Amino acid sequence: MTESSDPKGVISSLIRLTLVFGVAWSVCFWPARTLRPEEGVWWMTVACLISLIPGWGIVLIEFLPWFRGSLNKLIVGQMSARFLSVLVACAVIKIMRPQLGLVDFYLWLLIYYLVAMVVEVMFLRRKLQAIQTQESNPDVNQTSHQDPALP
């Protein structure tokens, strides 16, 4: 999901993901407050966190040895983690607060789920471009580590 497996790339991706969710939360604040004055912002915030926290885990999942070097495993792992986290959260909230309706919570969860998917696709696209660049120019990586004084 990040450009590379180095810590700076992961931290940069975590910051970007958090900033995107912060902007999305800010955009959704007024509609949430207007639609449901007493609890709208609370449930909108819960929906935001339900999508953001697994997103952090998904960014970090690339560090696991099983996912390195396999874009297919990475994509399946990310999709599974995202879907399962939202599914479990929906089930828990439906059990705890069955009176919540579409506008109260589930619409916000859908919006943030889509935001997360867009950001993850952008990160995966950058990773795929980096992999394609490495495959098309294998000499670039080898020569960049050599001493320029050597022939």
Image (cartoon, rainbow, N blue to C red):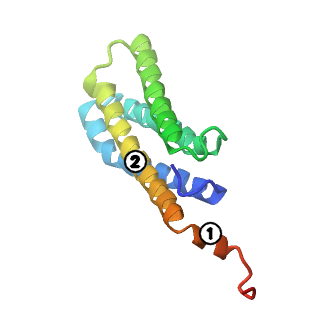
Nearer to us in this view, 114 or 104: 114
Q: Circle 2 — which element?
A: helix
Q: Quadrant of residue 141?
A: bottom right
Q: Which mark is residue 121?
A: 2
Q: Circle 1 — which element?
A: helix
Q: Earlier in the sequence, mark 1 or mark 2?
A: 2
Q: Pinpoint residue 120: horizontal percent, then vertical percent.
A: 43, 46
Q: Is residue 38 left or right of residue 74?
A: left
Q: Is residue 102 left or right of residue 143?
A: left
Is residue 2 something that shows in the picture?
yes
Give the number of callouts.
2
* For discs 1 and 2, the disc positioned in front in the rendered view: 1
Nearer to us in this view, 117 or 89: 117
Q: Pinpoint residue 112: horizontal percent, then vertical percent.
A: 37, 38
Q: Residue at x 65, y 75 (%)?
A: 144
Hey, what amino acid is under mark 2? Val
Hey, what amino acid is under mark 1? Asn
Q: Is the C-beta separation of discs 1 and 2 under 8 Å?
A: no
Nearer to us in this view, 110 or 69: 69
Q: Is residue 12 above or below residue 77?
A: below
Nearer to us in this view, 67 or 63: 67
Is residue 49 something that shows in the picture?
no
Q: Is residue 148 above or below residue 24?
A: below
Which residue has dot 1 on it? Answer: 141
Q: Is residue 140 left or right of residue 136?
A: right
Circle 2 packing at 10 Å, graded few (<14), some (14-19), many (20+), is few
